[in-house]
Every structure is written in structure tokens, then in C-alpha cells.
Image: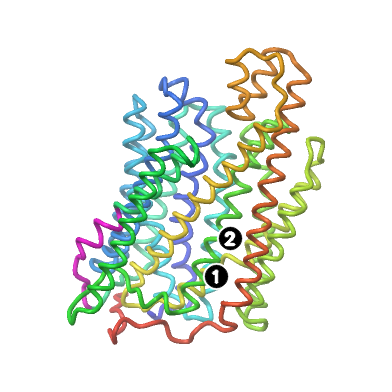
Amino acid sequence: MTSLGARRWWALAPLALSGLVVGLDLTVLNVALPTLATDLHASTGDLQWFANAYNLVLAAMLLPAGLLGDRFGRKRVLLTALALFGIASVGCAYAASAGQLIAGRALLGLGGAAVLPLCMAMLPVIFAPEERTRAIAIWVTANAVSFPLGPIFGGWLLDNFWWGSVFLINVPVVAVALVAVAILLPESRSERAPRLDLVGVVTSSAGLVALTYGVIEAGESGWTDPLAVVAMAAGALLLAGFVRWQRQLSRRPYGQPLIDLELFRSPGFTWGTVLATMSTFAMFGFLFTLPQYFQAVGGADALGTGLRLLPVIGGLLVGSRVADRLSPRLGVAPTVAVGFGLLAAGLYAGAASDAGTEYGFTAAWMTVLGAGLGFALPVTMGVALGALSAERSGVGSALIQALRQVGGVIGVALLGTVLNATYRGGLDLAGLPAPAAESVRDSVAGGVAVAGELGSGPLLTSVREAFVHAMDVMLMVCAGVAVLGVALALLFLPRRPAVAPVGERGESPQEVTV
């Protein structure tokens, strides 16, 4: 850890800003999809690839990006990644075709793959263990704030400017982050530059891409789709081969594996990462459905949807602040258990919604849910980060992000399957022509549109009630995951995090240049 004095809290600002810009890009795209479909003549497949191109490149490059930071300097690589993110944003804004936009989104994924883990990797460099949970809470909150801000800004921009403006919103934020990183952050790198584990990079990247693609395809085409099954199987085999190679390399006298498998001997790292992924799973679940609920059932526009999500942020801010004060007294495991208990309570309350539920009730349970995230997510990530040796914090942070990314993608695909199956099973499509019925089954937005075109009140009621019931079932699944999180936290998390992180075969601490 480097000594920056009071400047360390100022140094946190560019890290939070960098996380914010990546989160904004994820959420603002959803608002622009209908406009992109018209202006770029994008097919449904093109629209899916606008998101998938980003997710696949992000999954492929997380671990290599962490290695580059350890080897060449985390500040240097972070600056490069931010610059690439800004350039790619401009490319997306002025794309003249769907293909160009897909390429721009892939470049954004490449930049994001370095920004996220390297921001995390800098936290152990700057902050002592007793301050790290608070710093992570601020960084996590900056990420979470981007979820409602994306639709708010995106909706306003689409109402007043052309669709490319939703990507240009990244540029000024990136510019400020670049200046702040350059001025405020210290440089840090491994004292002994890690060698390039080419086999590890190739097998891990290919495995993560194949697994992520397979899960995405399964969510869209069904879990028995041959392409999805083959991709998931190939990804699992490649990742199994990657783990075997890492074990072999770690046994060699001078071997330098891409990741340190000894980390998984640490309960803090293993269960901190697992529980952080589980809380992300629950967060993705409600963020996946609530915008659709507000728009299709409540009639809100994109701007109104973003504003309606703000109680989550309020709860998260309060929850993270209270958890920061309670964690040293209660211990890690009880604090995380309280967080997952609040998550379960909020999700269970949300599952009682119906088509006529008032927003006040929705805001209340979203606040409780946000508080649960504030308790659980910063603390679990802090425990996982605390187990990392300073020497390889870049790759270690990338490993945490990679596991969360894959877990999040799997979560969205599984929850999307539950949502779609329940929604379709609750529809009354008697008397509808086949094309109209297919549009209704495809999505709740399509169902509302068809009902409006036909002027059918009964169909509109059927669509909205079927979707709300599907959302309730999906939220109950998320609540079950949260209850499991309570048990896992109490059983496996250490009450107090380890004072010294897991080392890497006696390697010395990293060199830090201020």
C-alpha cells in the first residue's frame, strides 16, 4: 500500500468516475434500441449483437487486461483503456451501419475489460484494510448509480437529440476521468513483471467467450438449442483445461501461471467472490424486469423509468454507510447475512406486486432491496480483495470481475427463461392471428403494442397481468437465492477478514511509484 495521506480519498474519485462511465454505457444502450432498429435498419439479431459484442469481448479480455496492468503498470493501462473507451464511444455515435456499431461496441468491451479490474486493483494499493470496505462501497455505489442515470440521461438525449448522443455522453466523463487518473492516482505494478502465460490467456479467453456465448444463446433460443449446448460444453472444457494448465504451471520452479489457484484456499476470497456474484445475480434480476414493468405496465417513458429506479440508489447509499459502521463491530459474516436478509425481504415484498400496485409500495421494497445491496456487495468484495496479494492484484481483481461477469450473464439467462416461460404460460391469445400472437408471446412490449393496434382492452389486461405474474415468480427465485446467501455467509465467511492476504510463493510486495 502506498502512503498518500488525505489525498487517497481524492484519488478514489477517478476510480469511481471510471466505473460510472462503464456502467452508463451498459444501461444507456437499452433506451436507444428501438431508435437504432429504425435508423440503422437493424434486425433483431443486430440488436442482440449490440449487447453481445460488448459482453463477449469483456469476458475474453478481463484476465489478460489484469495481467497487463500487473506487468506494465496499472495506471498506464487504465489511462490507455479509458482513452480507447472514449474513442470507441465516438465511433459508436457516428456509426453508419449496424456492422459499424457492433464493431464499436466490441471496442468498448475491450476498454471496459481493463477499466473494471484495474479500478478494483488500485484499491488495495491506496487504502489500508480497515478503510477498504468504505472505499469499495463508494466505488460500488458509483457503478450502481449508473443504472438509473443511464435511462434518465439517455431518455432526455433521445427526446432532444439524435441517437448517437447516447454514446457521446461517455466522452466528457472519460475526459474528466483521464485527467483525474493522470493527476491523482499513483502508478503501481508488480515488482517482478509477470511473464505472459500465452496458453493460459488463450484457453481462459476462449473458454469465457464460448461459455458466455452459449448462455446468451440459451437465454434467447432455449437451453436445448444445439448451438447453445455445444458452446457451453466447449467453454466448460476449455476452462477445465485452463485450470489444469494453471496447476501444472504452478508446480514448476519458475512457472508463473496467469492466476494463483492458491487464492481459492482462502475462504475470504472464495466465498467473498461467490457471494458478491450472488448479490449481482439478484441485482441483475430486478434491473432486468423493473424497466419493463414501469414502461409496459405503468406506462412510463425511458426518463420516467430511470427516475423510478432512484429509491434503489437511496437504499444502497444508506445501507453501505450503515454497513461500514457496523461491520467492524458485528464482523463480516453477520453483516453480509443481514444484507442478504434485506435483499430477500425486499424481493419477497416485490413478488406481491400486481398490475394495480401503487408506486409507493414499489419504491418501499426497492429501497429495502437497495439497502441489502449496500450491506452485502461492498463487504463481500472487500473480503475477496483483502485476500489478494499486492503483487498480482491486477489479475486477482480481474478474476473476481470475470466470475461476476459470467455469473451475471448466467443469471440473466436463467431468470429470463423463468420470466418468459411464466409470461407465455399466462397469456390468453384466443382468437388472435398467428403473427399477432407471436408478437405478443415475444415480449411484453410487443404485447402492449399489439393490444394498442387492435384496440383490445382484454388483451392488454391479459398481457400486463401475465407479465406481472411472471415478474413475481422471477423475484421469488431471486429471493430464494438471497436466502441461500444468508446461510452461506454465516457458514463460510470468516467473521473477521484475514490481516495478511494470501501470498504468491513468497513474492515481495509491489513497487509503488507516486
Q: Is residue 440 above or below residue 233?
A: above
Out of 19 and 417, give the one closest to the viewer: 417
| In front of the other: 194 or 155 | 194
| Viewer-closest of 78 and 235 | 235
Tell me the CA gap for discs 1 and 2. 9 Å
Reply above or below: 311 against 199.
above
Callout 2 secondary element: helix
The residue shown at (34%, 24%) is 96
Vertical position of residue 501 compared to residue 219: above or below: below
**Residue for badge 1:** 380
Indicate the secondary structure of the residue bearing disc 1.
helix
Amino acid carrying mark 2 in the image: Ser
Please report the residue visible at 41 percent of the width from the left and 22 percent of the height from the top.
Answer: 40
Q: Quadrant of the N terminus?
A: bottom left
Q: Is residue 44 magenta?
A: no
CB under 8 Å between callouts 1 and 2?
Answer: yes
Q: Is residue 194 magenta?
A: yes
Local packing at callout 1 (Cα closer than 10 Å; few below 14, some 14-19, many 20+) is many
Which disc is residue 279 wearing? 2
Location of residue 300 by image quarter: top right
Q: Which residues are magenta?
A: 192-205
